[in-house]
Image (tube, helix red, strand yellow):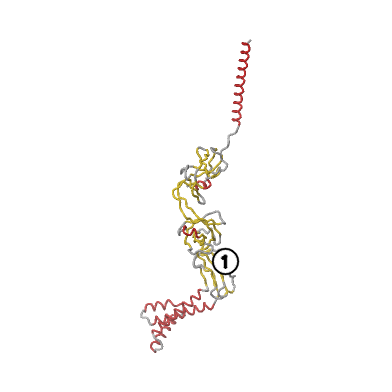
Amino acid sequence: MKKKIMVIILVIVVIALVAGAWLLFFNKESKEAKDKSKPLAAPVPVRTVQSWRGDLPLYISSSGKLEAIRVNDYIAEVAGNVNIKVKEGQYVRKGTLLFTIDNPTYQINYEKALLDYKKAYIQYLAISENVESLEGFAVEQKDLYSDDSEVAKIQQDVIEGLQKGTITRERIKYRLGEQELALKQALENYKKCSIRAPFSGVIGKIAAKQGEYLRVGSPVLSIADITRLRIKAKILVKDINRIREGATAVIFPVVSEERYSGRVYSINPLIYDDNSTYAVVELDNKHGELYPGVFCDVLLQVDLIKDKVLVPKEAVLERDGKKLVFVVKNGLGYWTYVNVGPENYENIVIEDKLDAGEEVIIEGHYVLNHKAAVTVINDEDTAAEEK
């Protein structure tokens, strides 16, 4: 009886073991089949740069408006009707006629002074021992008088005056000086009627209307050289000793996404009531992309951190209060916790756990997990950012 019971128990155990093995094998195959049926996660497209070793400039923030360094505002220096030769926004070269003012009196006075001076000069040549200059001058001045006989008559009158004692050589010399001074004065007045550009630049506001009669002092127009601009960037008194002339400045116009480089030209040492002063920043604008009056954010360099491993700021993420970067190796993105140092508006110092030359992700990594598959899709713009 006992033997039968033992045999039955043994058979039941064997059956149970076989059934368990069969179920285990079936479940394993089923799981493997399910795993095989699952599609693999597609690699995440990312952009990367290589970390590099270099220097990191540090800045303080400021702001200000662009100004033209060279500006001329013209007013009417003589009264008369104005004839404007240019238009607003027009680029003109040095010497271009900007406007004229019709004032016949100044023109007549200039022409008379010119004739009087040349007559005095002919008289002076009549008493000169330089005969060659006299003859040359007589021929040269045919445009002043009807013919050479006019010049000869003036010279003859001088000789007769000297003989009669009605004129002296000293008086002739003095008269030449008088007429030269009168000619210079008449010329200066005449120049006020025709204004030319003193430098190449752009025409600004034209205040006068074409043909308008202007009184002395009436505004006419302005011209500005915008190939070089400046900004008076406000700085606090606590920062005044941190800034040096010649320091680098980075300018961000509010009307553009571009940034421009400049230099600190000078620093105003006078402190105002709000405990601030300003630094004058100058920048090139040879391509004419910027205009006076545009508001800009300005960064002024105050320090330089040398010989550090650097990455773009967008490469650094924060997870659970810790800083990390994603390093790409063999098509996978690896979390790499790092300690960071100083930063500026575009780059940040990595103090440890990252070497120069490692490939770090700067775009597409915000939702990545550790060891996620990635595809690097750097374009020319991204490659240009690599240091």
Residue 26 in the image: state x and y as whole percent: 61, 24
Q: 298 or 111: nearer the eye?
A: 298
Residue 274 in the image: state x and y as whole percent: 54, 62
The residue sitting at 57% across, 41% down in the picture is 367
Q: Which residue is mark 1?
A: 205
Q: Identify which amino acid the numbered label 1 is placed on.
A: Lys
| Residue 100, placed above or below residue 258 | below
Q: Residues within 10 Å of mark 1 (few under 14, many from 20)?
A: some
Would residue 386 be seen by someone viewing this image from the given angle?
no
Residue 296 in the image: state x and y as whole percent: 54, 58
The residue sitting at 45% across, 52% down in the picture is 304
| Residue 228, placed above or below residue 5 | below
Most extreme residue toward the bottom, as rendered?
Answer: 164
Q: 175 or 39: nearer the eye?
A: 39
In terms of secondary structure, where does tag 1 sit? strand
Tell me the quarter of the picture where residue 148 sits.
bottom left
Would residue 297 be seen by someone viewing this image from the given angle?
yes
| Residue 272, placed above or below residue 308 | below
| Residue 348, placed above or below residue 43 | below
